[in-house]
Amino acid sequence: MSVVYLIPAPLEDESLQAIPAYVLDAVKQCNVFFVENDRTARRYLKKLDKAIVIDDYEWFIIHKAEAQVKNQFMQKLKAGKTIGIISEAGCPGIADPGQVLVEAAHQVGAIVKPLVGPSSILLALMASGMNGQQFSFVGYLPIEEPQRKRKLNQLEELSAKFQSTQVFIETPYRNNQLLETILKSCKPQTRICIAANLTAANEFIQTKTVAEWKKQIPELHRQPVIFCLMG
């Protein structure tokens, strides 16, 4: 029976200390890799172990796990291959296109083995001081400011009503604009956690009210950031 390993990747290239040692054992058992980014995945495996011969493995790019890639994945499962799925950063299947392949693995009865590793979503939630018993990850907010403001107000209302932490992200080059909209749109007492560069040497995690953030606004341009909101 085929085995599919869900292999965590570092959130930051030099943060291999966040990757458990047993991940390398799983990597060495794989014949095939389906990865979100071919170049960074290959570099990651060489950092795990310089003795790894990259060309000994078959490589496929997930992209959005379109029909062709899914068919290739199914063929490798039927051939009895041991497959590794690697996200660009963090854990496969969590805010990641690899989830479609994991679904396909279950459909054919393959063994799916998730491996422990860093998840920026969970690390931010853990460090936020907000409700970890009830939370939602809502992904990216709308780009246009009027829709983004409406969405933030909806999240604020949901959070206050259900005491639920709302977790969301933005592309690194739009972080400052998102924070600006948060500070203009949300209530002064609403708490916002900004978790930037998680696991890196310059990691920054702080939770403050909107009113407090307005007094000292951080520079977030081109930094990987997770935002948590508690109304």
Image: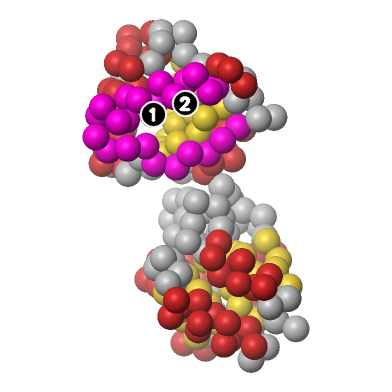
Could you tell me how many numbered marks the image carries? 2
The span from disc 2 to disc 1 (Cα, nearest Å) is 6 Å
Query: Is label 2 in contact with label 1 (beta carbons under 8 Å)?
Result: yes
Prevailing SS of the magenta stretch: helix
Above or below, comparing residue 100 to residue 13 in the picture: below
Measured as percent of width and height from the top left, residue 35 is found at 47, 70
Element marked by disc 2: helix
Per the image, the residue denoted by label 1 is 151
Residue reaching furthest to the bottom: 79
Percent position of residue 137, x then y: 53, 39
Residue situated in front as seen by the camera: 151 or 19: 151
Give the residue at x 62% y 20%.
Answer: 163
Q: Quadrant of the N terminus?
A: bottom right
Residue in the image at 42% along x and 72% along y? 66
Residue 44 circle label? none
Three-letter amino acid code at the position of disc 1: Lys
- In the rendered view, tell whether residue 31 sits above or below residue 23: below
In which image quadrant can residue 65 be found?
A: bottom left
Q: Which residue is mark 2?
A: 155
User: Disc 2 residue type?
Assistant: Leu
Residue shown at the point (41%, 11%) measured from the top left:
187
Q: Is residue 149 magenta?
A: yes
Is residue 47 visible in this depiction of the protein? no
Report the span colored magenta.
135-159
